[in-house]
Amino acid sequence: MKLISFQVSGSNAYGALTDQGIIDLSREFSDRYPDLKSALGQEAQNEFQQYIRQACVDYAENEVTFLPVIPNPDKVLCIGHNYEAHRLETNRAKTDYPSVFMRYAESQTAHLQPMIKPYESDMLDYEGEIAVVIGKQGRRIKPENAWEHVAGMSCYNDGSVRDWQWHTQQFGPGKNFEGTGSFGPYLLTAEELDPSEILSITTRLNGQVMQQGDTSMMLFPIPELIAYCSTFIRLNPGDVIVTGTPSGVGAKRQPPVFLKEGDEVEIEVTRLGVLRNSVQQG
């Protein structure tokens, strides 16, 4: 299934994205599952699949406003320097463990919604990534069991306000400006994912390819990231792990390339669709 969160007529909803349009699942299931985060367990997904088989489409895509796939995650755990070429372009030392920083839910935006270039900076950068969404609670998860805890995956643009990121050794401020972390367009659920499949990531800026990589290049594969993060904190349904970006970020180009108002950024991941955002000053 392709699951989305969206807004229609001023109300938040969630549903399934199909080739024919959007089926509003919240209309049928909101009494038990008030939002998509609460519906990530296997029982809800089985119910959704049965309902979708006989349901009619409720909306065309252009009739709704996309929201971040999980608008209200308890945690967004982001992984830094998880591709060797990106580690090298940033002159970071090799580490034995993943680099983890936190992003707040309030900093997120959605597919076809603007990424916000803040007035305080001219150094908004793109970072195409894969987001893993947790569907089953767990603590101290073993890598070999990690996929049992995955609800699905999506595209993510971990937009970074570089000068604020570089104020100190801590990434937090530059990774949490409003409207800089784009998440979507949909969650491809786990039953449609093959853990052994290599997924490619491409970032385009105004149609030009800026980043290209694939999951075979990860220094710490997804099961290891889940195991590591679940060691220091319990992972809950709806939590998001953003798994790192390939090389080619704007800050490390010569000359540097930063996002400007009116730019269009696309993150495309194999089978996870194309996440598309324009850039707006704000």
Image (cartoon, grey):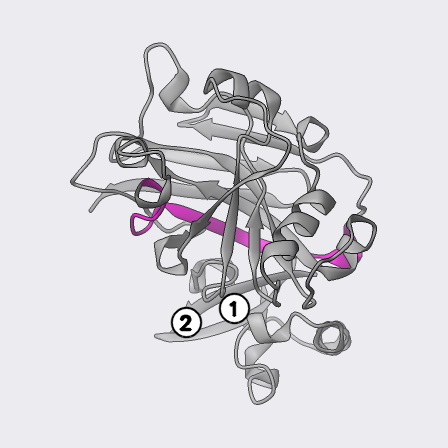
User: Is residue 19 in view from this perspective?
Assistant: no
SS at badge 1: loop
The residue drawn where x is 27% and y is 35% is 262
The residue drawn where x is 17% and y is 39% is 120
Give percent across and percent down for residue 183. Answer: 48, 51
The answer to whether residue 191 is magenta is yes
Amino acid type, callout 1: Tyr
Amino acid type, callout 2: Val
Residue 220, quarter of picture: top right
Mark 2 lies on residue: 8
The residue drawn where x is 70% and y is 77% is 44
Residue 161, quarter of picture: top left
Mark 1 vs mark 2, CA separation in Å: 9 Å
The answer to whether residue 205 is magenta is no
Say whether marks 1 and 2 touch (CB < 8 Å). Answer: yes
Magenta residues, as a range? 174-193
Give percent across and percent down for residue 108. Answer: 39, 54
Q: In this view, does 74 lie above or below 159?
A: below
SS at badge 2: strand
Give percent across and percent down for residue 233. Answer: 58, 60
The residue positioned farthest toward the left in the image shown: 119
